[in-house]
Image: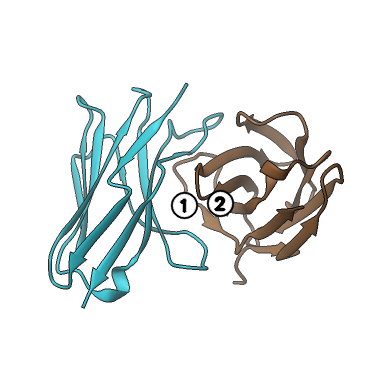
Amino acid sequence: KAGVTQTPRYLIKTRGQQVTLSCSPISGHRSVSWYQQTPGQGLQFLFEYFSETQRNKGNFPGRFSGRQFSNSRSEMNVSTLELGDSALYLCASSLGQGWDNEQFFGPGTRLTVL
Amino acid sequence: GENVEQHPSTLSVQEGDSAVIKCTYSDSASNYFPWYKQELGKRPQLIIDIRSNVGEKKDQRIAVTLNKTAKHFSLHITETQPEDSAVYFCAATRGGQGGKLIFGQGTELSVKP
């Protein structure tokens, strides 16, 4: 089976712009979660989707949003970009509904905000 | 809110030595504790996990221990090898639906040949 894929792999944006990142889970996986990884803050949970429904959200401002499509693919959007949004954005998929299922991570999208 | 603290942030050992990484969680309802390894430039990958009904779990050279009373869990790597060099993340969650995976800050392990 193909692993989790994320596009694009690299993005450079300027402050104030918006960006959309895409995540395709492993075939058959219905849960997709998103994380922001930075050197200072580690891996921080953004949100999680299951069957097109957002089930939980981390402590991020409303500029961060996401959605999941019927084929389980997910997108996250960041509006009005700030310098501090520069990070590696990782998505992960899992087979079951619960968090005690192995999370399979994608390669990440490296976002740089200038 | 839920929090996971991980120590040390960096760890350097000689090849063949053991390495221990410790985590403390705040949410007493947490019942699932995975450990992820992230090599430089690569994605995190699950290496071992433990559920709250078990005190210890081993898989070849790696083991995880859990002390629910103290809300501590630890990763033990024996007979370290250079390929063990990576960043290791612990995490905790309530499991089930509606929870979230809370990660520690990561430990950069360096194994010197």
The chain under label 2 reads: A
Question: What residue sits right under mark 1 in the picture?
Answer: A102
Q: Residue at x 61, y 53 (%)?
A: A90
Q: Which chain is cyan?
A: B
Secondary structure under tag 2 reads strand
Q: What quarter of the picture does the N terminus of chain A occupy?
A: bottom right
Q: Residue at x 65, y 49 (%)?
A: A30
Q: Is residue B97 visible?
A: yes
Q: Quadrant of residue B69?
A: top left
Q: Position of residue B46 (x, y in %)?
A: 41, 57
Look at chain A in the picture and name its colour.
brown
Q: Which corner quadrant of the image does residue A50 belong to?
A: top right
Would you say residue B60 is visible in this rendering? Answer: no
Q: Residue at x 68, y 59 (%)?
A: A109
Decide: is B1 above or below A31. Answer: above
Label ID, residue A94: 2
Q: Is residue B5 above or below residue B45?
A: above
Q: Are marks 2 and 1 in contact (CB under 8 Å)?
A: yes
Q: Amino acid at mark 2?
A: Ser
Q: Find numbered disc 1 in the image and state the secondary structure of the residue it sits on.
A: loop
Q: Position of residue A67 (x, y in %)?
A: 78, 42
Q: Earlier in the sequence, mark 2 or mark 1?
A: 2
* Amino acid, disc 1: Glu
Residue B84 x %, y %? 30, 69
Q: Quadrant of residue B81?
A: bottom left
